């Protein structure tokens, strides 16, 4: 079953969840609208895969769970359902009451930027993410050049921004015992 976004039809969250379970493709739910998620470029997928691998190896045996692209996240304050490119939670994973497929307690969220999603990922999506009490860190990863933007929560309404450019740069993840080398993150996409 394929869902279509409609500017005329508004769906309840329960209708969305019922349709999403039956759908062959993923959709976000925003303010009553069901928005299909487009496929990514090979570069986007390579970066998301590298991020997953680097986080997985760094967090093996530690009390965290790691998810990529197909794990739904619920943002209760905004009643938004979305699929981050990368997500790490502390264990145990917390799920939306009554659901077995929707996470609610991310520590770290990451998005690989594309021309079509960059404005949303930086703006409304980050605004929604900031309403999650457990969220401590947000990464925006550029797929067109070796560049990462890091936002680390300092207090309830304060986030520290740091940017990293170049393949010789390393990103120290503040919320986790992880350091990411951009050379590893962009392996096979850019050469040193």
Image (cartoon, grey):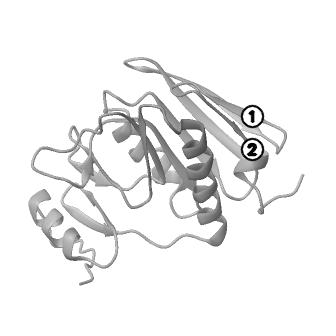
Crowding near pointer 1: few (<14 within 10 Å), some, many (20+)?
A: some
Q: Quadrant of the N terminus?
A: bottom left
Q: Is residue 146 above or below residue 105?
A: below
- The count of marks equals 2
- Most distant residue in the front direction: 61
Q: Earlier in the sequence, mark 1 or mark 2?
A: 1
Is there a contact, CB below 8 Å, between mark 1 and mark 2? yes
Q: Is residue 3 above or below residue 30?
A: below
Secondary structure under tag 2 reads: helix
Q: Is residue 32 above or below residue 171?
A: below
> What residue did someone put label 1 on?
170
Q: In this orientation, which residue lies closer to the viewer: 116 or 99?
A: 99
For image coordinates 49% across by 35% down, the residue present is 61
Q: In this orientation, which residue lies closer to the viewer: 50 or 124?
A: 50
74 to the left or right of 115: left
Q: Is residue 181 above or below residue 51?
A: above
**Picture coordinates of residue 147 (x, y %)?**
72, 45
Q: In this orientation, which residue lies closer to the viewer: 127 or 75?
A: 75
> What residue did someone put label 2 on?
182
168 to the left or right of 105: right
- Most distant residue in the right direction: 192
| Quadrant of the image occupied by residue 88 | top left
């Amino acid at each position: 079953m394929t869902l279509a976004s409609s500017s005329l039809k508004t769906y309840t969250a329960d209708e969305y969840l019922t349709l999403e379970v039956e759908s062959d493709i993923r959709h976000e739910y925003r303010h009553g609208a069901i928005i299909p998620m487009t496929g990514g470029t090979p570069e986007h997928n390579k970066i998301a895969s590298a991020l997953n691998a680097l986080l997985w190896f760094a967090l093996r045996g530690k009390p965290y769970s790691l998810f990529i692209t197909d794990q739904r996240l619920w943002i209760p304050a905004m009643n938004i359902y979305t699929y981050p490119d990368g997500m790490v939670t502390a264990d145990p994973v917390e799920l939306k009451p009554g659901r077995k497929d929707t996470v609610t307690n991310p520590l770290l969220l990451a998005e690989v930027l594309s021309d079509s999603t960059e404005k949303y990922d930086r703006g409304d999506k980050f605004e929604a993410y900031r309403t999650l009490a457990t969220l401590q860190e947000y990464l925006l990863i550029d797929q067109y050049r070796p560049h990462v933007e890091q936002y680390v929560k300092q207090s309830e309404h304060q986030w520290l921004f740091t940017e990293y450019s170049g393949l010789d740069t390393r990103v120290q993840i503040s919320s986790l015992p992880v350091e990411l080398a951009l050379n590893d993150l962009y392996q096979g996409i850019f050469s040193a």
